[in-house]
Structure formats: structure tokens, C-alpha cells
Amino acid sequence: MRPFNFSAGPAMLPEAVMRQAQSEFLDWQGTGMSVMEVSHRSPEFMALAHHMEATLREIMQIPDNYKVLLTHGGASLQFAGVPLNLAQQGDVVDYLNTGVWSTKAIKEASRYAQVNVVAKADTTIPDFESWQLSDNAKYLHICSNETITGVEFQEEPAVSVPLIADMSSNILSRPIDVSKYGVIYAGAQKNIGPAGLAIVIVREDLIGQARTETPTLMNWQTYAENESMFNTPATYSWYLASLVFDWIKEQGGLQVMAEVNQRKAARLYEVIDQSELYVNKVDPRYRSRMNVTFTTQDDELDKQFIAEAKAAGLLSLKGHKVFGGMRASIYNAMPEEGVIALAEFMQQFEQTHRKAG
Amino acid sequence: MRPFNFSAGPAMLPEAVMRQAQSEFLDWQGTGMSVMEVSHRSPEFMALAHHMEATLREIMQIPDNYKVLLTHGGASLQFAGVPLNLAQQGDVVDYLNTGVWSTKAIKEASRYAQVNVVAKADTTIPDFESWQLSDNAKYLHICSNETITGVEFQEEPAVSVPLIADMSSNILSRPIDVSKYGVIYAGAQKNIGPAGLAIVIVREDLIGQARTETPTLMNWQTYAENESMFNTPATYSWYLASLVFDWIKEQGGLQVMAEVNQRKAARLYEVIDQSELYVNKVDPRYRSRMNVTFTTQDDELDKQFIAEAKAAGLLSLKGHKVFGGMRASIYNAMPEEGVIALAEFMQQFEQTHRKAG
């Protein structure tokens, strides 16, 4: 058995996907070539690209008036891409700040537009009533799951301007209503595939407004008009993403993913809440189903936890340096067995390291 | 035996590299994880990153005053990256136009600076004496190998401004004197690794001049200051690139690569020149060692050649649509056996399809 890898990203991929990719690594579909050695314009690869998009549209139920773009550079390049495609210099854009990733998006957007931060919080989602929305914003940007603290939106805010979501760390984890969004974007390295790829799902009427200085390969129109093949795409990442989409469909789609993810997260939060050792600092209403953070509130004991967990085959549990403690990232690919094993380990660790007093 | 894959890119990778990657696909260095599932900030991956850069510096003999950056998006994103990092709006920049890839670079640069085309040709490198260099250019840009027609620089032009080279399709194919360049950039998908990654080798004094609107992830300074890890890099592509650099070193380095590549190209041009059927349209002084183009000058016969070659295990020989005919891309990973097999096939095909008259 492989150890369980709780890395926040790059993160584990489904074992079935990895085994298939390994088996056809040198000879893809009888071509005698690896899929990464095949021209992106070949009929075989074009068929893969079309299959991938069709499967993603099916599992996410993406409406016909949305384009699916596969872009270079991960979600971080879209921190500039969003304002470059949707706002002119001087335009007002609204951003909600719920943590480190929101802050990065805000910092980059501030170079291109007048950013209004509608509300700010670290370990919760501020109540919608408290948001200071602009009258004239071109869009509202949110991060639907803050990976570092483990704070997750539970439902979309109802706003009149296009809602833009960085969904890097919870895309494909549950069904969402795409039609409530103007743009959804996500880096691949959590729930999609290898790092270095991003997916941008954009309502068609929001394409074609990029400001003049937008680099051609950051202009969504370039991707929309060229099936994301204006230049050579990251073909191997596309291939693995396609296998992941197939796997999700085979598992029963996003409703099944959501049920499994809900059970996985609930198991860990249950252990934490029943514990006298572990603390989760996030507002319980907005706890993430993808990134479960916890700490013993004792740095040395946290280190010991991480080391002993690693020895037990529970890997990459160290929290992000800005938040400390532990973080169990339990994306789609983490099997329930991994979460059960972690829950048991947490309970055993508490028994042997019970706090004094 | 695998068939021989003459794809122009994504192109074949060394078989030894592919076999190693396959063998450790699910368990990299005893971590129990695939390298693509490991955090880019982990000690194991950081060691890989440092090893990769050190190996590249060694085989290319990159001077200490040059930074090696691993960027997102392939070479095409650098078509904007070069002017954004090196010129202000209105500055004059010199470009040599030797074909399709030069033209693409010029088109994108024209959006950011005043481009002066110093000379233009399709199937040769214009004589240096004929170049109309600007007095005040910020740099001179060349494409060191035009993949589509198969035209290759043989030595660097001596200019007083920084020389910028798109070396996507001949980097690592022979020793070059890096110190003659201001910037060398290359997409990975020919001689480096999988598509979606680019390498930018830049003299340190050319970093830090990016214009204000440059997206953070297109600013070379961002990469230079963060070991190319400002955001999550394309870790699996880095890993394969590192294996390819190791492989080149094991083969004896770039001098050995150059000798093998010279023999490979010479063999094919010899068949073409001795033939009464095949024609290569490139100025013999500037024939590419990487992309050998030829045609029977009969579209139907070209199609037949491509089909029969495929049946014989010689794949992806169709030329680019803008140039037609055939193209054998024989990058580092193409073994001499592949070229010998192609040469023999060409001679046999000529015998059975000799021109009338």
C-alpha cells in the first residue's frame, strides 16, 4: 500500500489514474509514443482534448454559454489575468479578503485597477451584510477555499456584478451552480492534475474585453478562439487531467465526491472537537472540507505529531508556515481509508501525549 | 523496439529517461509518492531543483553572472516577456525575421515597443552586412533555429546591444558561448522535456528593468528572486528536464551531442543531395541540424511517403502546413539508428517511386 499523502498541493492524485498513466507511459493508445511525445495537433491528441472538455462539462454541468480554457501558469497568473481581461486602468473592482490567497490576488489586481476590499477576515467568511460593495465594480472576486487556514465558502454570495472565484483548492469537490459565476479559475495541482496548468471557466460575454497591453497568452480570447492551443499546451498535464475527470465520472460524479468529502472532513473535525488536545481555529460555519487545520497549541508537540505521523505513513501534515500547526489536505484523491487512518492516529497520539493537567 | 518519432514538438524524449521516469512513477526516491505529488517546497524537491540547475549550468557552461529561470507558458509567453522586461513603450528594438517563429515574436513585440526588422528571409540567414541595425535599439532578437523551414544560425552575430535568442528548437544541441547573449530562452518540448515549461537564461544586469505593467509572473525578477518558485512550478516538467540534463551529461555533454547531431543531419542531407527525387529548399550554409525538411515536389507523392514511412515505424514526418512536404525533427533524443533507418527508407522509396523521365 502507498502511504497517505496529505500535501496541500502539489497533492496526491487518484491511485487508479496514476497506475493507468504508468502502464501507458511509453506507449499511449498503441501509438508507440508517450502521450507527452505526441504532437498536440495530432488527431489522437485532439480527440483527447475534446474528450477532456466534454467530460469536464458533463461532471460540472457547465452551461453552453461558458467557455472552458486551459491556460498556462497556474492560478497565480490569473491574479493578473482577471483584471487584465475584465477591467481598464482606473476601474473599480471588488475583492473579499479571506486570507493569504485572497491577499495575493488583491496585491496583483491593485497594479491594474482600483481595488475595493469589501471585507476582511482570517478564519471566517465575513457576514454578507457587512460587505462594503462598490456601486460601480466591474466584478467581485472571492477565493472559495483558503488552503492555508482551511476556510471555505458554503454558498455563493448573491451579487449583481460578475462573481469571479479562485476555486483552486475546492473545484470538483462538490456540485456547484456554474451559472452563478462570471469566471471560475483554478490551478490544477489539487483536484485536477499536475502543477503548471490552470482551468478558466468563463461566461462568453466576459471574453473580448481585455485591455490592449494584455499579453496574447493571457488574453482569454486567445484561448477561446484556439481551443487553448494558440501555442503548445502542457499536453501531459491535459492528459492526466482528462484521466482525473474520467475517474470522477466513474466514481459517480460530483455528488458522490461531495458525499465522500463531507464524510472525510466530518471525521477529522469530530476527532478535533472531541479532543482535549487538538484545536481548529476556524469558524465552524466555514470550516473547509478540503484542508483541515489543527494544532496542539504547542510547537514542540506539533513537530512531534508530524514526525510520528510520517513514520506511520501519514505524510505532509505540516501546516503552512504562516499558520503553523498541522494541515490535512483531503482532496478528492484522498481515500476514506487515509482519513480513517489519520483519525485513529490522532486519537492514539492524544492518548500518549495527553496534556498535563 | 519503439518506433522512431520525428515529431517537431512535443518531441520524443530519451528512452533511458522515459524508462526511469516510468519505473519511479508511483514511488519517487522512496518517498512513496510520485514526484508530481510532492510539495515543491519539500527538501526532496528542492534538492532536485538545485541539482537540475547545477547540471544545466555545467553542461551549458553558463557563467556566474547569468540567472537560470524556469518559467511558465513556453517560449511564446516570452514573446511578450522579452519586450516587457527589456523595453519601455516607444523604445526601439531590433528583430531579425527568418521565418514563422521570428514573425510571431515580432508581432507580439510590436504591441510593446517600436520594432525594427533588420532583415527578412525565409530559407536562409541574411548576410550580416545587409542588416539594417538601429542606432538605439534596446536589444537584437533572433530565432536561432526556425523549426518549420529548418534554417539554423551557425554562429552568433556580433552586435553591441544585448543579443536575445529564441533557442527553443536547438538549445542543448551543441556547445554555445552563453556570454555572447543577453538572454537565451527556450520552450521545453524539443530538447528539454514536456511542453508547458520554458527556460530563460538571462544576464543579471538585464533583470530588474521590467516595465510597471508587467504581470508579476512574467517579470524575470520574480523568478530570479524566488528560485523560480514564486508560485507552484510545473514540478513534473522540472523533474523530467533534470533527468534529460543528467542524460546529456552521461552521454558526454554538448560536444558529444553536437558530433552526433552533426552526423545525423549530414546523413539525411547526403541522401537528399544524392537523390533525384528529394529537394531541400534551404540555403545549404544554414541548413538546420535539428529539423531536416524535404519534399518530392509532388503533393501526392509526399503524402504517400508519409504514409509508407509511418507503416515502417517512422512517425510524424509530415511537414508543417505552411511549408508542406516532409520534416524530420532529429533532436538530441533521436538515436542515430532512427536517422539511419529513415535514410534507408528514403533511398528505398526513391527506388520504387523514381520520377518519370
Image (cartoon, coloured by chain):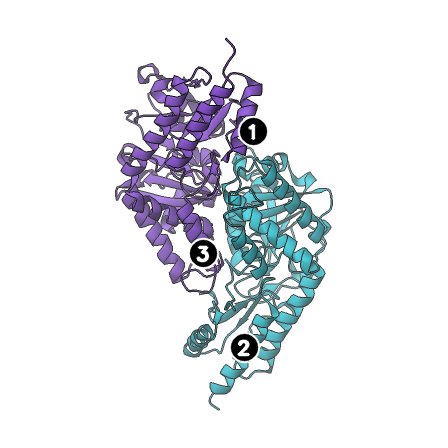
Chain colours: A cyan, B purple
Looking at the rendered structure, the kind of residue marked 3 is Ser
Q: Are marks 3 and 2 on the same chain?
A: no
Residue labelled with disc 1: B307
> Left or right: where does residue A39 sit relative to residue A204?
left
Q: Determine the image quadrant of residue B93.
A: top left
Residue B300 x/y as whole percent: 58, 20
At x 59%, y 42%, the residue is A91
Is A56 situated above or below A214? below
The quadrant where residue B82 appears: top left
Q: Nearer the viewer, mark 3 or mark 2?
A: 3
Q: CA distance from mark 1 to mark 2?
A: 66 Å
Q: Going from the N terminus, do you reach mark 3 or mark 1 first?
A: 3
Residue under pointer 3: B23
> Could you classify mark 3 by the number of other residues whose Cα lies within 10 Å: few (under 14), some (14-19), or many (20 or more)?
some
Marks 1 and 2 belong to one chain: no
Q: Is residue B157 left or right of residue A155?
A: left
Please state the chain letter of the residue tagged with numbered disc 1 in the rendered image. Answer: B
| Residue closer to the observer: A336 or B110 | A336
Is residue B134 among the parts visible in the rendering?
no
Residue type beneath disc 2: Val
Q: Amino acid at mark 1?
A: Ala
Task: Name the quadrant containing residue B332.
Answer: top left
User: Which mark is nearer the camera, 1 or 2?
Assistant: 1
Label 3 lies in what chain? Answer: B
Residue A210 placement (x, y as % from top left): 59, 36
Are the residues flagged by discs 1 and 2 in contact, CB closer than 8 Å?
no
Q: Residue at x 37, y 53 (%)?
A: B49
Q: CA distance from mark 3 to mark 2?
A: 41 Å
Tag 3, which secondary structure?
A: helix
Label annotation for residue A279: 2
